[in-house]
Amino acid sequence: MTRVSLRRNQEARVTTTVVIPLYPGVTQLDFTGPHQFLARMPDAKVLVASRGGADIEADGLCFSRLADLEAIERCDVLCVPGGWGCVEAIEDERFLESVRRLAASARYPASVCTGSLILGAAGVLRGRRAACDWAWRPLLELFGAIPDAGRIVRDGDVFTGGGVTAGIDLSLAIVAALRGEEVAQAIQLGLEYAPAPPFDAGRPELAPPPVRAAVDAAMTGRLSAQHDRIARIAAALSPVAQAPS
């Protein structure tokens, strides 16, 4: 009979450091979902960080007592969340440099939702398949990435998740890569993660046409302006964003 151990052999125990970098305008579920699961991983240290350790407000919640992103020297997993503030985060040279530096040290650079655009701007996704929120996904090409409609996409050592809720699945995939599938499944069971949404409308190709049209209409103006900004940023960053990984 196979026994699942949530602790590793004492001699083999090495702390895995996970860094989740926050910025103004981040979507809270992009990082609180992964944080909940990654924090349950045996021998894991999860650091939620911001520039200067500044408080971050996300969707009406305030997150404080954060680590100083620029003071963190390295990590094993870098999980970059997305949000409407991703464009400003990319324009923040110090924030982007911290992402670039930590991604270079990480065993597994990762992102959730539009966090992949930040990884792309940091030069991590050149020539790699990557997921992103469906409305922003085509913009990955501006950073030399190959857009992929998958919910979870792994290309080499890089993990990327699609929309907001994909962050939970992404974290389980990372746990499985680091600790094995049985440990990941035990965490899943412990948190009773068994999604069964009341509606099958979570992807644009599945949503009823009126629902898709309403969402498109609500997002069009705001997205258009953000897309133009990202195109300009990508053009300016091209020597860095297109550097070989």
Image: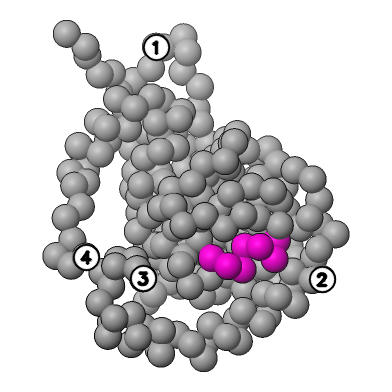
**Mark 3 lies on residue:** 204
Q: Magenta stretch: give its range.
A: 137-143
The answer to which of marks 4 and 1 sits earlier in the sequence is 1
Disc 2 residue type (three-letter): Ala
Q: Are marks 1 and 3 in contact (CB under 8 Å)?
A: no
Residue in the foreground of this view, choosing between 231 and 52: 231
Q: Quadrant of residue 102?
A: top right
Q: Left or right of 214: which side holds 68?
A: right
Q: Earlier along the polypeptide chain: callout 1 or callout 2?
A: 1
The mark found on residue 9 in the picture is: 1
Kind of element beneath mark 4 = loop
Residue type at mark 3: give it: Pro
> Label 1 sits on what residue type?
Asn
Q: Which mark is residue 236?
A: 2
Spatial CA span between label 4 and label 1: 43 Å
Residue located beneath label 4 in the image:
200
- Please determine whether, in this image, residue 96 is positioned above or below residue 174: below
Question: Which residue is painted at 14% across and 65% down in the image?
Answer: 198
Which mark is in front, 1 or 3? 3
Residue 107 percent location from the top left of the image = 60, 34
Residue at the extreme left? 198
Q: Is residue 62 magenta?
A: no
Secondary structure of the residue carrying tag 1 is: loop
Disc on the earlier residue, 3 or 2:
3
Please report contact status of discs 4 and 2: CB closer than 8 Å, yes or no: no
